[in-house]
Image (spheres, rainbow, N blue to C red):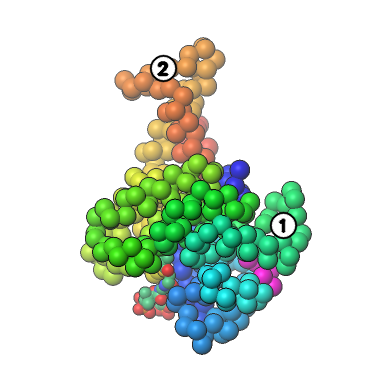
Amino acid sequence: MASGAATVIRRCQLYVPGSSMRFLEKSRSLTVDSVAYDLEDSVTPLKKPEGRANILAVLNKDRVPGIREQAVRINPVSSGLALDDLTEILKGKNLDCLVVPKVDRPSDLHFVTDVLRQKLPERHAPGSTNPVKIVALVESARSLMDLNSICQASPYLSGLGFAAEDFSLDLSITRTPGLNEFTYARSAIVTAARAFEIPSALDLVSTTFRGEEGRKFLQDESENGKRFGFNGKQCIHPDQVSVVQDVFSPSQQETEWAVRIVIADKKADAQGRGAWTLDGKMIDVPVVGKAKAIVAKAELCGMDVKALQEKF
Ligand code: 1VU
């Protein structure tokens, strides 16, 4: 199984430009599953050293309760900057995850994995429960074609993210609000994540976010991602976080349904019944599996599942 499958939750991964101390400080006041302090596209070449120093300073501060996971997006392995990024930020005491952009081939992840093992041997020894995890970004045709081997390239791989802007550039795609032009890529990413038990499949960034209209657009796009099978979305602005996290959390209604199924399944099981009915609908193994997954996610999201179990 891929790293940390049972406990990883990344409904939203918020990018925070590493060159801006103001943004970095602001991120510490937010409630968000994952922050990705960025050293790549949001940081200009001349600002990379300052970005590394800022991020290291933040990683060495005490953790704040609102942030579950602190990630850093390094520069692509092919840029020649990744080793400098890693040398600096792996000194940080509270680093949980690396976001690796432009992963075009498995060797990109072999490189990062080797550096992790070399620089942090205890965290990456066999049996360690606390490795630095990796989220790989799919940004090119080449990456999509090699997804099978990329997904098997590191035991620390814990997420795949879709980077739609670079992917569009690579394939000369024009992005439309309905996202139909990305159907193949998005579906391939979700399918690969499931096939290789990689816990997170993170959908594309929505660059629209201002005002009521932006909020509605983001909500619709997030729901589209959820229907597609993604379990989280990359974000660029604090205002996006709660909208996205709500969409990727089980609703109260869904959770109640799931708790009822799990309780009823125990009774059915004791009676030796694999298929039974609830509210006029047939329930069998895959439906119970879905219900159990919803209950587990609701617990991870901090919902009071126990109270619901007592209710039914
Ligand atoms: O008023 P305050 O100073 O307390 O807070 C501001 C601002 O500092 C803060 N804020 C952020 N804090 C943390 N992380 C962020 N990403 C972030 N963005 C803003 O929120 C308060 C309101 O800010 P604002 O509405 O005045 O925002 P600006 O107009 O200053 O900035 C908007 C952009 C979009 C430029 C900014 O949010 C940003 O730089 N976002 C990140 C961009 C980025 O990282 N892009 C690369 C990753 S996307 C990708 O590659 C997908 C794969």
Q: Residue at x 76, y 61 (%)?
A: 121
Residue at the limit of the structure toward the top, as seen here: 271
Residue depth check, mark 2 versus mark 1: number of the one nearer the observer: 1
- Image quadrant of ligand 1 equals bottom left
The C terminus, quarter of image? top left
Q: Residue at x 32, y 50 (%)?
A: 183
Q: Residue at x 26, y 68 (%)?
A: 211
Relative image position of residue 306 (x, y in whole percent): 53, 37
**Which quarter of the picture shows residue 229?**
top left
Q: Residue at x 54, y 82 (%)?
A: 48
As displayed, is residue 269 above or below residue 114?
A: above
As displayed, is residue 50 above or below residue 217?
A: below
Prevailing SS of the magenta stretch: loop
* Label 2 neighbour load within 10 Å: few <14, some 14-19, many 20+: some
Mark 1 belongs to which amino acid?
A: His
The part of the chain drawn in magenta is: 89-96
Answer whether residue 31 is visible to the viewer in this image.
no
Q: Is residue 63 left or right of residue 271?
A: right
Q: Is residue 176 left or right of residue 34?
A: left
- Of labels 2 and 1, earlier in sequence is 1
**Which quarter of the picture shows residue 239?**
bottom left
Relative image position of residue 201 (x, y in whole percent): 46, 51
Asked if marks 2 and 1 touch (Cβ < 8 Å), the reply is no
* Label 1 neighbour load within 10 Å: few <14, some 14-19, many 20+: many
